[in-house]
Every structure is written in C-alpha cells, then in structure tokens.
Image: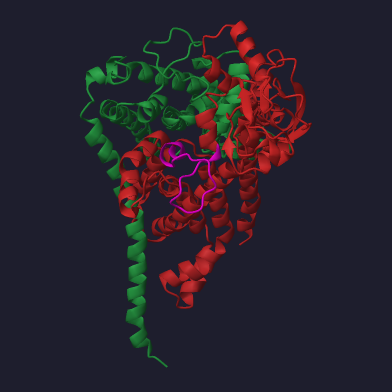
Chain colours: A red, B green
Amino acid sequence: MRDRIITGAFQASALTIILTLVGILLFLAYEGLPALTKKPFQDLRFAVHPSNPIQKLSAHECRALFQKNLTWPDLGGPDAPILPIHLSNLERYVGNQATPEKIRAFLDSVAQVPGILMALPPALLPPSLRPIEVEWSAWTALFGSSRWSPTYEPLPEVGIWPLLLGSLWVTFLSLLVTIPLGIAMAIYVAEFLPRALYYPMKVLWEVVAGLPSVVVGFWGLVVLVPWLQRSFHLTTGETALAAALLLGWMTIPLMASLSEEALSSVPRLLVEASYGLGATTWQTILRVKIPAIRSSLLTATLLSAGRILGETMIVLIVSGNAPVIPTSPLSPVRTLPATLAAELGEAPVGSYHYHTLFFLGLILFLLTLVLNILAYAITPAEKTV
Amino acid sequence: MPSPLLKRPSKRWREGALTLLVSAISWSMLVVLVGVIGFLVYQGGKVLSWEFLTTPMQEGMQAGGIAPPLVGSLWVSTLALLIGAILGTATGAYLSEFSSKGHLHHLIELLVNTLAGIPSIVYGLFGMALFVVVLGFGASILSGALTLSLLSLPILIRNAQEAFSSISTDLKLASLGMGASPVQTFWRITLRLAFPRLITGYVLAMGRLLGETAPILFTVAAYYLPAYPHSPLEPTMMLPYHLYALITSGTNITQTYPMAFGTALVLVSITLLLTVAAAILRFRLKKHLHV
C-alpha cells in the first residue's frame, strides 16, 4: 500500500511535465489570442463634425489623419484643417488639473470646428458630433505593417515584422559565429586534446554556458560596444553585430559539446578503414567523420538556434532596441524576447498592448517548439550511420 | 605526376596549420572568458567589500551595498531549487526506475527535452499569467520561485535520471532478490548511492537559477525595495535584475557603474563557484565511485 502511494507520487510528479507544457501553451494562447479579436480602441468612439461626409475610415487612414499625414480633402472630406483630439493630447490642451466642467466646455467648443476628429470614451464625446466607424483588421495590423509602436494613441501600430525579422537576423548572425567555432572546438577536443585536459575543457564550456546573460550583456555594453563603435566609425555601437558576437560566443559550448559527442560516436570501423586507405588525420575528419555526423550537426545547429532565438538580456542590453527592419549587421535591432522584457512591465494587465505581447510570446514559443521538435526528429537518423 | 616525396611536406604543413587553427580557436574561448572575468574583477574589485555585501543601497542606487538583492536572490533560488529538486528527482526516479518504458515514458522524455529548449522569457510570461495574475500571488517570492522551479525541471530531471541509472543493476537486483520491494530497493539502495550525483545536479541548477533574469522580471523582482522580505508573498529585489536596473536606468553613470561592476562581480563569482564546484564534484565521483 505504501509502495503504491510512493510510486503514484513519482508518476504524478512526472505528469507535472505534461501539465507545464500544456499550461504554457494554454496560457499564452489565452492571453495572446485576444490580440486577434480585440480592438485597441475597444472603449473609444470616433466622431467627426456633422457636416463631414465621411462615414468610414480604415485604421491606416485614421492614424494618418491623427498624425496629420493626410488631410480631409485627401479622403473627400471638408476643405478644413484637421483638428485631432484624443485622450493624450486633450491633457495638453486643458492641463492635467482640469475639472470635468472645464473639459466638457472645451470639448463643446472644439466640436464646432468643421475639421474636428475625436477619439474619446463615449461619455466624453459631445452629442453634437456624428460617430464614424473605424475599421480594424487584426491580421493587417499584426502582419501587414512594418512598424511597432504599441502605445501610440489612439491607434497603436503593432506590426510584428520588425521584431520577428530582428530576431531571425540576430539568430542568423550568431549562428555564423557559433557553427564554425563550435565545430572547430569539437574537432580539437575529440581529436587532438590531451586526455588530461579533456575534463577541464568541458568545465570551461560549462562555465561559459552558465555565465549569467545579464553579466555578459553588461560586459558587452562596456567593452564590446564602444570598441565596435570606434572600429566601424558608427554613431552607436549598439548593433545586431554586438548582440550576435556575444550570443554566438555564449552558445558555442552547446554547439561544441553536441558536435563533440557526435564526433566521438563515429564507428571505429569507418575511421580505421579511412586510415587504412592512407588518409591523414585531417582527411579522415573532413571526408569521413564530418559527413558521417551531418544529421547530428544539423540537430546541434537547430538546438543552438533555439537557444539564441530565446535569449533575452544580452539583446536587450547591447542591440540598440530600435524596432526597425534590420538591413545590415550594423543596424540596431530589436528581437521578440527583448520586446517582451522591455514592455510587459509597462503594459496594464488585460490591455491590448498586454495581449499583443502575449501573442508575440506565443509566436516565440511556437518557433522554439518547432526548432526543438525538428531537432529531435532528426536525431535518430544519426544512429543508422 | 608529382612525386609523393614532394607532396608530403605540403600536406603535412597544411595539416599542422589546421590543427594549430582549431587549437587556437579552442583556447581563445578561455582567453575571452579570462578577459571578461578579469575585467569584472578589476572594475568590481574597487567597490567590493564586506560592507558592500552586507548593507542596503543608499541614495537611490548610487551608493551603499547590495544586501537586499543578494538576500532576495538567495531566497528565491533556494525556494525554487527546493520545489524543483523534489519534482525533478521524483520525475527522474519515475523515468529511470518505475515507468514501464511505454508511450507515456517516451512522451515525458520528449517533453522534458522540449521544455529544456523553451526560452526563459516564455517561462516568465507563463509565470506572470498563471501565478501572478490568475492564482493571485502577485509579484512575489512565491511566484518567482515557482516560475524558476519549472525552468530548472529539465536539468534536474535529466540529472536525476542519469544519477539513478548509473547505479549498477547488480546491486538493485541483489536487493530485489533478498525480498525487498522495488520501492524499498529505491529508497535504501538506489537513492542512497545516487545521492552524491543528485547533489551535484542541485548545485549546478542553483548556479543557473541565480543568474536567470528574464523569468523574474515580471514575477518577483522589485526595481527598488531596500528591505528584507518577511513572507513568501512579498516582492523582493534580486541580483540579476538589480544589475540590469543599474546598467539601464542610472542617470548618473559615474555613480551607478561602479555599483554595477560590483554587482556583476558578485553575481558572476557565485555562479562560477557553483558551476566549478559541481564540475569538481562530478569529476571526483567519476574517479572514485565505481558502484
């Protein structure tokens, strides 16, 4: 009986693993998917002067009007200068100590202006104005835009491409460091390193992989970033390259230890056959061993890519954090994890911004999940070599 | 046709160059590591003192010590390790000793591998949604410790699994043959013999947990709270986040950077110490424990 309880407890704790993974997926979806259904202006109404013929605006047009990049005549509206009023500029007009009466009087007076465009909660909207509809498509907003300014009032821009491409760009650049250096180290350790130094080398790898990323980021900010700035004559050294060098360096141990394991597992028969044919050490490594462990190297690469993709602090500290689509290794860049780390603390729970960030988290989770599953799906192939 | 005698030296030269190249690359890792740590020791050594470790911050963050984040980090990581070690060791025991190696076993192993690859910031998001918001623990030591314990599970499970399966089958069979039940065998033989290896894994996991920043951003860490926590439901400062705050928010770099160097040195020393300790422990186990 006691034995049953104990084994039951062991089994139950193993089930927490399943619960954790399912829980992560559920919670990210639960908080992230509303980004596809909710509108950022759920509690706002848009309204124009009754003489304004416009009935409907797309989110894009409406935002352009608020930014004064479009004028009313561009859209077939009245020939009058636009006067946009929304919550955050209202405060500028009336001051932050204004009484409700004063706000009401101000709104009633500007409601007379023919070019008025208001985005306010229904309770504040002067009744003389005519409400208009603003179309919001979540898909266009998330995937059809190349700008990320999620707190812009009253219509935020939540295009995820700059962040997604930023993440992929940094990952790609980091892999350029990780793959060759990782494989080189694996070759050295598997083939040339004196036995006595094998264990110290492994410890070295473990230490590098275990360095707190915030410390590495800080070192990068103080040493690497100014150095890059001087050597490339940049206005700022906080670039994708800085992040990639640090991330690539920190991920080498993972790449190297996986490759080293694979190299040491190449069957003796193959190796001896190669030597027997007169091949040199390096010919055997490059022509026999490396081709034999192709699939393991691919697995190692995918796992390294997953690790790099999810790294947060280094990128947050040294990459400049500009949410623009990167064009060169020297452009500042912002990644998915860095965005989450930088913005989630400021997004009110349940707000559109909050849901959008969870949506980003969901994308990041699915990306790394796919990379990992792919990596493990490839692994068994190596055993048939 | 070139004679083999002429070809050989060039080949040998090329091979030597390649060998030299990979060895240079390999040892350059050590050079960079020494560079990073040396720099931190040089810069951080200037502010490091007993007082720096034992007194709270002063004047915002521009002076004083780092005692509150240090204490907070130790609290959260210890609690996380406690939860993670219990769950992780039990799961490892199940996988290695008690499961019937069927579909469930393979599913769990696959999920452990998958969880190991999930970014720590995603754990942070999950911890925030579940522990902070839905369960209502708020930003607190408990929320952070639970989040971090989930993060540490893959390392701890794998370690426990390896530890248990490294114990020789002969001993387990002998125990079973004497009439002990599988659970008795596990309790009296496998667990005791695997204990040193388990401890090694805990030390390693502790080193990793202390350095994690992303998962604690939204679950525990207070930006500035120069007090010591009294209950697990309070928020606390933590070293990695304190370092981040010092780096990014300081308006007065000449004042905050020395503090940041000191904090970074402390953080890196603790994680380095734990990682190396775990490595040495494991090395000695490999050498001396032939059971």
Identity of the residue drawn at 47% across and 56% down = A176
Quarter residue B18 falls in: bottom left
Q: Position of residue A114 (x, y in %)?
A: 69, 26
Q: Nearer the viewer, residue B253 or A177?
A: B253
Whether residue A129 is visible to the viewer of this picture, yes or no, is yes
Identity of the residue drawn at 37% across and 43% down = A203
Marker count (numbered) = 0
| Residue A360 against residue A48 in the figure, above or below | below
Q: Nearer the viewer, residue A64 or A272?
A: A64
Magenta span: predominant SS is: loop
| Residue A204 against residue A114 in the figure, above or below | below
Bounds of the magenta span? A314-336
Q: Position of residue A188 (x, y in %)?
A: 39, 59
Q: Quadrant of the N terminus of chain A?
A: top right
Query: In the orientation shown, which residue stands out farthest toward the bottom?
Result: B1
Whether residue A362 is visible to the viewer of this picture, yes or no, is no
From the viewer's perspective, tell me whether residue A258 is left or right of residue B289: right
Q: Position of residue A107 (x, y in %)?
A: 64, 16
From the viewer's perspective, tell me whether residue A305 is left or right of residue A320: right
Q: Nearer the viewer, residue A357 or A209?
A: A357
Quarter residue A320 falls in: top left
